[in-house]
Amino acid sequence: MDPAVLYFWPFTNALPHRDLQVFSTDRRNHLAIKVTIRAGEPGERFLQRFKRICSKDGLFKEIKKRSFYEKPSEKKRRRAKDAQRALRKRIARAERARKGK
């Protein structure tokens, strides 16, 4: 099954008009995002909100990352690179804070 399939289920205790839950599932982790369609909201606007929520949560990056196998050595190299980047960011923030005082 495609990792970005959308499932629509009605709320159990919701108003009868257009209140829906949207689940975006990944078979490995069962990720879920709940978005309520507002009364009178166009479908395009709802999809924009859904995409914005997914991108902020990092869902698209996660799906893209998991779409291909990553060897353990590559994963280790990527994590080390990410750690170095985070350390440089922390150092830069600390220097900016020191200059600001």
Image (cartoon, rainbow, N blue to C red):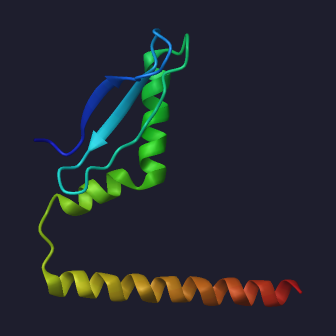
Q: Nearer the viewer, residue 68 or 18?
A: 18
| 79 sits to left or right of 41 | left
Q: Residue at x 19, y 83 (%)?
A: 74
Task: Please say if 41 is above or below 84.
Answer: above
Q: Quadrant of the C terminus?
A: bottom right
Labels in figure, total: 0
Can you tell which quarter of the image residue 77 is in? bottom left
Q: Residue at x 71, y 88 (%)?
A: 94
Residue 54 % position (x, y): 41, 45
Q: Quadrant of the N terminus?
A: top left
Can you tell which quarter of the image residue 69 is in? bottom left
Q: Nearer the viewer, residue 23 or 11?
A: 11
Q: Residue at x 49, y 27 (%)?
A: 36
| 85 sits to left or right of 68 | right
Residue 76 % position (x, y): 25, 87
| 34 sits to left or right of 5 | right
Residue 7 % position (x, y): 26, 30
Residue 79 % position (x, y): 33, 83
Going by the picture, which residue comes out furthest to the right?
101
| 65 sits to left or right of 39 | left
Task: Please say if 3 is above or below 35.
Answer: below
Q: Nearer the viewer, residue 13 or 98?
A: 13
Task: Please say if 21 is above or below 89.
Answer: above
Q: Residue at x 49, y 33 (%)?
A: 49
